[in-house]
Image (cartoon, rainbow, N blue to C red):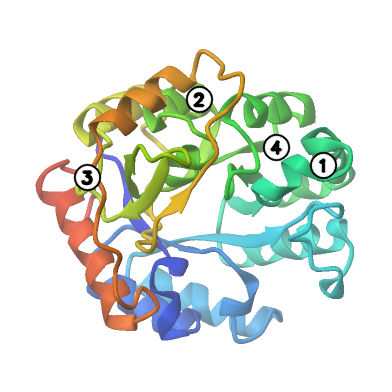
């Protein structure tokens, strides 16, 4: 079964394109799917403009997935100016339905939430309560919530447990290979845990190396880091072949992480990756539009030519 290939609009965020421009750009790349991962990308959230965007995508044979930001009211990333967590999630589900998206991507927060008062547990609890409060609305809309392992907030096992407790009938995962490394996990190991739950994805490569201060992680284009993508795609095809392979390339500066004091068994594979890695030159202008487009398009080419992904090749 051929895996669909797409990209997340965040990969080319520097262009500040709105949904119609992104649809046209995605169609020019002959991909299968476009993830519009934030609500600000839409010119309006009213029905008529959303219908126009859907018609534009349909005419070009392009599927759309829809997303938003943090839906955890206690996370440092939550924006209360947009309404309550339930209101924001309901809006995202409504937009998803209007655009024909089977998923509403969202996230809890970021790694710093793990060390906030109450730890990550309180945020997991509040996220589950928000999901349960909108369960009927999501099911009636035919849209499943796809929670991302985002910016070091949730380890794979934590996200899988959250999905099970909230309800697999309407909640799944946005599986992010780059964010897996920010929780000091091997993306292949994370895939084994989250693949059965994955509804959509965010894919990029990582270079990791050791330093006196701890492991250093730098995200890079697909095929230019340490992930064994041929093995990853084989396993992906076994676990979630109907899930699209969505590129969210965020190439940029390195980030150093503290080595865990009491590493769990999963850390061994991550540490083995770090021993194979090497320091990279930091991109001069990661916020440059042409740089972002080059990183994305080079990654798409690798996915097509080397990994054999995509229907519209």
Q: Which residue is mark 4?
A: 170
**151 shown above or below 149:** below
User: Which mark is in front, 3 or 4?
Assistant: 3
Residue 304, position as x, y percentages in the image: 16, 50
Front residue of this view, candidates 67 and 124: 124
Disc 1 from disc 3: Cα separation: 36 Å
State the CA–CA distance, disc 4 to disc 1.
19 Å
Compute the Cα span from label 3 to label 2: 19 Å
Report if residue 168 is visible in the image. no
Q: Secondary structure at mark 1?
A: helix
- 93 in relation to 132, above or below: below
- Mark closest to the chain's N terminus, 3 or 4: 4
Q: Nearer the viewer, mark 1 or mark 3?
A: 1
The label nearer to you, 4 versus 2, is 2
Crowding at dot 3, Cα within 10 Å, few <14 / some 14-19 / many 20+, comes out as many
Say left or right for 130 vs 59.
right
- Residue placed most toward the observer, 8 or 212: 212
Earlier in the chain: of badge 2 and badge 1, it is 1
Q: Quadrant of the N terminus?
A: top left
Give the residue furthest to the top. Answer: 265
Q: Which residue has dot 2 on it?
A: 196
C-alpha span from label 4 to label 2: 14 Å
Q: Which residue is mark 1?
A: 123
Is label 2 or label 1 in front? 1
Query: Callout 2: 10 Å neighbours few (<14), some, many (20+)?
Result: some
Task: Give the side of residue 65 with respect to residue 209, left or right.
Answer: right
The residue labelled by disc 3 is: 309
For the residues marked 2 and 1, what is the alpha-carbon distance in whole angstroms?
23 Å
Identity of the residue furthest to the left in this view: 305
């Amino acid at each position: 079964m051929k895996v669909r290939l797409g990209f997340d609009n965040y990969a080319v965020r520097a262009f500040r394109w709105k949904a119609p421009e992104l649809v046209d750009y995605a169609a020019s790349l002959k991909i299968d799917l476009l993830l519009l991962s934030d609500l600000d990308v839409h010119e309006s959230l009213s029905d008529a403009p959303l219908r126009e965007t859907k018609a534009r995508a349909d005419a070009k044979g392009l599927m759309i997935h829809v997303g938003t930001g943090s839906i955890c009211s206690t996370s440092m990333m939550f924006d209360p100016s947009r309404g309550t967590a339930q209101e924001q999630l309901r809006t995202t589900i409504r937009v998803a339905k209007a655009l024909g998206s089977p998923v509403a991507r969202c996230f809890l927060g970021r790694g710093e939430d793990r060390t906030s008062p109450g730890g990550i547990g309180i945020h997991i609890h509040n996220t589950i309560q928000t999901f349960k409060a909108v369960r009927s609305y999501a099911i009636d809309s035919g849209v499943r919530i796809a929670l991302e392992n985002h910016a070091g907030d949730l380890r794979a096992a934590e996200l899988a447990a959250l999905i099970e407790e909230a309800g697999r009938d309407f909640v799944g995962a946005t599986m992010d290979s780059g964010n897996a490394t920010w929780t000091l996990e091997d993306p292949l190991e994370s895939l084994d845990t989250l693949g059965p739950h994955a509804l959509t994805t965010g894919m990029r490569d990582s270079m990791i190396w050791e330093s006196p201060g701890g492991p250093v992680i730098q995200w890079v284009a697909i095929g230019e880091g340490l992930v064994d993508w041929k093995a990853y795609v084989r396993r992906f095809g076994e676990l979630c072949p109907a899930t699209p392979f969505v590129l969210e390339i965020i190439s940029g500066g390195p980030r150093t992480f503290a080595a865990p004091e009491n590493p769990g068994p999963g850390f061994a594979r991550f540490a083995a990756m770090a021993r194979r890695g090497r320091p990279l030159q930091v991109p001069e202008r990661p916020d440059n539009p042409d740089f972002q487009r080059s990183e994305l398009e080079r990654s798409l080419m690798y996915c097509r030519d080397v990994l054999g992904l995509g229907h519209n090749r």
